[in-house]
């Protein structure tokens, strides 16, 4: 983990209340770190006027920048959304353990719900770099919440969308899409990030193995305050340190 | 490397400086040792340890405030056996300064057992008896809100301790001086104050408490003036050395806390938002002392009566 001062390259809305933030730095430590980011890792961003940092998952990296996609859910993210090109951000990075690419098998499925979708974009890209094309299943409340759809399509990944209100794609939840697609028989492994009820439902429905990324209110983000614990078959684990990605079968909801 | 001007002496100990990460905000030091050489610390107060392993409370355990946070972790820790067997040996590899063993119990027997267990550890130089955890029912704080039970615990622990015993006091009392005096009369070697203040936040959209535990311990810069006042009151009323704690976030705060009467200072919440803060404070102290014409830090302890 490093503490870095990063420059905002852009901070633009993808949808109402959902922003894409691109960060960069000439600091060699940053350039070295972005090369080794693993999908599923996150950063912890200091926001002026707020005491605690805000943990945000990494949605993409290239050789010189880092992308975060976040939803405005409170005062902290609202302040973040008002920052613009040229502003600096104090960031702790990279944090947590990412998804295990080696477990994917030949045809994994990536399952995202709402603002849980962003880290799956980097995962899809990193899997492609290993020659593995993943199926993508994304769920949103309405068509106004859909994010990163085109990014997945431009990677060439077959991407299915569901919306709770049926305003786009299949009406219903990602679990409905997965059932219809026969994911348990066609896919080799699943990777998921999204709200807790979705992850819980997946754990029940999926018979293939998988990994899920958990979310929790955090104090520090690097494993010292014990604020974000979850229960697993191996005992209490820190979501920020041993996670946020866990074997689905290990997590006790 | 070592600056004699920062050196502090109390209870037969010599600390190279007064800066100590507070229990619960620094784990067992291992995560920080990956970031910087933690041997710069004056001492290190390890995560509150109980007899049995504890999972702690349900999440959410963290709620933000204007200038700090609430936590309701609930003493999650792997238990004293595991701490002694696997964690302290790891810490020894990277850290050679004094360890303060913060212990928490649910009965007098627990505290006695933990004191004996931690006294055996060579690197442990102080037993910090936490009778002030606000997040655990029927334990922790219940001993720290009554002078009689605080004295009872202190006496029991002192009877078996082979290391100095510092009692960590709760601010959630009407008269902290009465508790401090009771601990002094019962034989405490020193006091650590303050622990967190019991607080609450509500998510108004969801109409529910933010913390699953409803209430939690409030910390951070928002409690610094209150902590400072309590340290000052206790320093004026007892002759025990005090480790001042509560919202300390800068070298300036350290000086202020020492002027109020603290021999050493614990840094808590600040570690969570700036993992390098202890190191920075230690590095900034000499320059600030120059500016304030402070020759040695010991000169300012308790100068404000």
Image: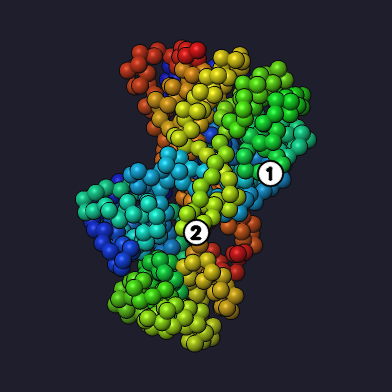
Q: Quadrant of residue B276?
A: top left
Q: Chain of mark 2?
A: B
- Give residue A51's mark: none
Give the residue pinned by disc 2: B206
Q: Nearer the viewer, mark 1 or mark 2?
A: 2
Residue A171, placed above or below residue B41: below
Q: Chain of mark 1?
A: B
Local secondary structure at mark 1: loop
Front residue of this view, candidates B245 and A36: B245
Crowding near the residue tagged with mark 2, few <14, some 14–19, many ≥20 C-alpha atoms within 10 Å? few
Local secondary structure at mark 2: loop
Residue B13: percent from the left, percent from the top? 58, 20
Residue B152, placed above or below residue A248: above
Residue shown at the point (48%, 51%) measured from the top left: A218
Residue shown at the point (60%, 69%) measured from the top left: A249
Front residue of this view, candidates B6 and B265: B265
Residue B298, placed above or below residue B58: above
Crowding near the residue tagged with mark 1, few <14, some 14–19, many ≥20 C-alpha atoms within 10 Å? few
Residue A35: percent from the left, percent from the top? 33, 59
The quadrant in which the N terminus of chain B is found is top left
Residue B23 is at least partly visible in this image: yes
Give the residue pinned by disc 1: B137
Q: Residue furthest left?
A: A86
CA gap between label 1 and label 2 equals 26 Å
Residue A65: percent from the left, percent from the top? 28, 58
């Amino acid at each position: 983990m490093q503490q870095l001062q990063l420059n905002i390259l852009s901070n633009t809305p993808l949808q109402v209340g959902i922003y894409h933030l691109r960060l960069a730095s000439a600091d060699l430590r940053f350039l070295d770190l972005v090369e080794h980011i693993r999908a599923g890792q996150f950063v912890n961003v200091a926001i002026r006027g707020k005491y605690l940092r805000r943990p945000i998952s990494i949605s993409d990296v290239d050789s010189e920048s880092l992308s975060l996609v976040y939803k405005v859910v409170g005062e902290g993210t609202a302040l973040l959304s008002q920052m613009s090109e040229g502003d600096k951000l104090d960031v702790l990075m990279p944090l947590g353990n990412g998804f295990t690419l080696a477990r994917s098998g030949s045809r994994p499925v990536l399952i995202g719900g709402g603002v849980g979708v962003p880290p799956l974009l980097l995962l899809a890209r990193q899997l492609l770099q290993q020659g593995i094309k993943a199926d993508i299943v994304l769920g949103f409340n309405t068509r106004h919440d859909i994010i990163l759809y085109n990014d997945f399509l431009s990677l060439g990944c077959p991407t299915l969308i569901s919306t709770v209100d049926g305003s786009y794609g299949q009406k219903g939840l990602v679990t409905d899409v997965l059932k219809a697609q026969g994911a348990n028989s066609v896919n080799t492994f699943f990777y998921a990030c999204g709200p807790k009820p979705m992850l819980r439902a997946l754990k029940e429905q999926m018979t293939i193995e998988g990994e899920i990324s958990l979310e929790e209110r955090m104090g520090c983000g690097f494993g010292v305050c014990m604020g974000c614990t979850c229960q697993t078959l191996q005992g209490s684990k820190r979501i920020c340190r041993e996670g946020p990605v866990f074997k689905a079968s290990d997590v006790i909801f | 490397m070592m600056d004699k001007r920062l050196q502090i002496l109390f209870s037969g100990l010599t600390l190279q400086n007064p800066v100590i990460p507070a229990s619960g905000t620094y784990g067992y030091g291992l995560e920080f040792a990956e970031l910087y050489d933690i041997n710069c610390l004056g001492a290190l107060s390890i995560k509150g340890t109980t007899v049995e392993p504890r999972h702690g409370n349900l999440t959410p355990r963290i709620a933000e405030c204007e200038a700090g946070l609430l936590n309701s972790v609930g003493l999650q820790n792997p238990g004293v056996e595991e701490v002694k067997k696997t964690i302290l040996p790891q810490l020894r590899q990277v850290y050679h300064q004094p360890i303060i063993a913060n212990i928490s119990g649910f009965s007098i027997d627990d505290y006695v057992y933990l004191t004996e267990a931690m006294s055996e550890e060579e690197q442990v130089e102080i037993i910090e008896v936490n009778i002030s955890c606000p997040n655990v029912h029927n334990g922790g704080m219940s001993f720290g809100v009554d002078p009689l039970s605080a004295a009872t615990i202190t006496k029991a622990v002192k009877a078996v301790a082979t290391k100095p015993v510092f009692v960590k006091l709760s601010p959630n009392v009407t008269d902290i001086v009465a508790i401090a005096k009771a601990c002094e009369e019962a034989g405490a070697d020193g006091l650590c104050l303050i622990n967190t203040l019991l607080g609450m936040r509500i998510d108004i959209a969801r109409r529910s408490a933010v913390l699953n535990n409803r209430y939690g311990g409030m910390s951070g810069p928002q409690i610094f003036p209150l902590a400072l006042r309590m340290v000052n009151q206790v320093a004026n009323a007892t002759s025990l050395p005090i480790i001042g704690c509560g919202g300390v976030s800068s070298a300036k705060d350290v000086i202020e806390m020492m002027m109020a009467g603290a021999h050493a200072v614990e840094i808590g919440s600040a570690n969570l938002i700036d993992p390098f803060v202890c190191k920075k404070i230690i590095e900034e102290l000499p320059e600030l002392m120059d500016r304030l014409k402070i020759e040695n830090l010991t000169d300012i302890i308790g100068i404000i009566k």
